[in-house]
Amino acid sequence: MVARAKAPEPATDRSKEGDLSKGAGLIDGKIVPIADAKLPITDWGFLRSDVTYDVAHVWKGSFFRLDDHLARFQASMKGLRLSIPMDSSDIRRELMNLVRATGLRDAYVSMICTRGSVKPGMPRHPKNCVNRFYSYVLPFVWVMPEDMQARGAHAIMAKTPRIAPESVDPTIKNFHWGDLTRAMFEASDAGADIAFLTDGHGHLTEGPGFNIFAIIDGTVVSPDRGALEGITRKSVFELCDEIGVPYQIRPLHVSELEGADELLTATTAGGVMPVSRLDGRIYGNDRPGPISAKLRQRYWQKHEEGWHATPIQYD
Amino acid sequence: MVARAKAPEPATDRSKEGDLSKGAGLIDGKIVPIADAKLPITDWGFLRSDVTYDVAHVWKGSFFRLDDHLARFQASMKGLRLSIPMDSSDIRRELMNLVRATGLRDAYVSMICTRGSVKPGMPRHPKNCVNRFYSYVLPFVWVMPEDMQARGAHAIMAKTPRIAPESVDPTIKNFHWGDLTRAMFEASDAGADIAFLTDGHGHLTEGPGFNIFAIIDGTVVSPDRGALEGITRKSVFELCDEIGVPYQIRPLHVSELEGADELLTATTAGGVMPVSRLDGRIYGNDRPGPISAKLRQRYWQKHEEGWHATPIQYD
């Protein structure tokens, strides 16, 4: 069954839903506290990680770039031959309802489409499944603590290579994190905060949940392959245009990082986050460099100004 | 919380658990009907496919090679730095209880360990998670229909390469099926039943859920790399010894398949399953070849004789 949420309920009816301030899920069309947001263990979204998703953030009561996230989610579903009887405007309405129900002003909002389960009596093939829609909302937290953002993260170049795009397309958001998880252990074992992954042939790809940028001779460079086409990355490029800094999306060899002036990461879960060390090499006097700092400051300042904002009508 | 099942209950208490004949799950230490077997949507086992598992089968009231599955499950957990406060004898007891509760005589029994969720207040890193144990039982079905096994499956060589072992170790059972799912669509688009995947460099690896064998000049050959070390594969090799057919685990180039006499697959979910066509090429007169047929026949015959069997004490 594909989840179809009810029409928004009056606030007085919502008490029976329990405390949603810690987050909520939309499961089989019902809004439930996050602790009750569960999926069947037999859903192929779990058993085969046959699933796509997207995550938007809500900041001070407004979605940021909601239409970009909805458009990418549709493209991801299409890429995996998943489909649900909801278009982007249906999904937008459900997400709005869900955030409104929690009352959260700063939040992450996840939309998920799983392969689901095989229709009774049909052969066990993904084409014979009923795909499912899930959503959940959690309070906003900094995926990278604010003090770490202020000093710049310490990164390592992981030995584990990113899953090749020929096997799993990284531009379709997916939960295939085995390589990324292994890289996170490599980082913590080395006393570092985060890991960068290569393609196994010397080119940079991405990190666990974030895009990577190197600032080389005044140009912001981000890998063209093996990485998500990040929406925060898109925001970074827009900010580059605004402050007059050139940028390039191109192959980025790890050897180029030695001569880079600054390193930077970007993700919905935390925005624009500078890096001050890579494998012991110190960048920008061991603090976020000037372009990184400016991009980060501007990214949040523009949030205040209503940049790409879709306000939520709370009760 | 790691699931800890209760001691086995007397049969009279079990009625409240509902109808378990369609399958059951062990969730948070409770036995529930399969339809109620769910996991939190926020478990990193789902959100990052940070999970390992194993599946044993029960045939005519006995587990097959249960100790092999338990040993591999322990090795898989260790490989991913997952741990639960249960040893193999604890897990064995829980699985026995669960199958007994369903009354099923032919079944699949899944044991799963997920990363779980981050402990409250701790940094978001897999090392800070409380790992979780889940299990479920489903009635035995033939993953490959019996008539297809009798004629031999029609296979294609998929264009999608298997995820490289450097990124995700295929000897640790995992749910990273993005490449395998894509290959299944390639197969159905081509009118075939199943897909074989290469490593992207001309060497055979495995298929969606099964090991692959080619019988070349009277020798059973299976790839040494990029594939699960299958327990059914191990059974095939034991049967080879028994019937006096040599076998090899070595690199297997796709070009060698042209000169092969027979092709064969093996998986817990179906046993030993012959292949009669690959990309239009017909093997063994379009029917399972003599060695394949003998291995398949013997695999099930020896089940009847109590081979590697651990009987379940039903009430």
Image: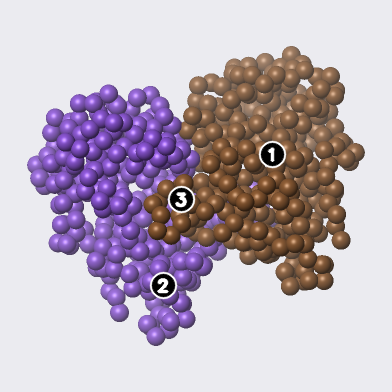
Chain colours: A brown, B purple
Within 10 Å of disc 3 (Cα), the crowding (few <14, some 14-19, many 20+) is some
Identify the residue under disc 1: A71
Residue at image x 65%, y 50%?
Answer: A86
Looking at the rendered structure, the secondary structure element under dot 1 is helix
In the rendered view, tell whether residue B200 sits above or below residue B174.
above
The amino acid marked with disc number 3 is Asn
**Marks 2 and 3, how far apart at CA:** 25 Å
Chain holding disc 1: A
Identify the residue under disc 2: B20
Residues A156 and B233: in front is: B233
Can residue A243 be seen from the camera position used here? yes
| Tag 1 near tag 3, CB within 8 Å | no
N-terminal of the pair, mark 1 or mark 3, is 1
Identify the residue under disc 3: A128
Residue at image x 55%, y 45%?
Answer: A82
- Labels 1 and 2 in the same subunit: no
Residue at image x 62%, y 45%?
Answer: A53
Residue A286 coordinates in the image, percent (x, y)? 74, 28
The quadrant where residue B263 appears: top left
The amino acid marked with disc number 2 is Leu
Within 10 Å of disc 2 (Cα), the crowding (few <14, some 14-19, many 20+) is many
User: If the image is split into quadrants, where does the C terminus of chain B sit?
Assistant: bottom left
Looking at the rendered structure, the secondary structure element under dot 3 is helix
Residue A107 coordinates in the image, percent (x, y)? 76, 51
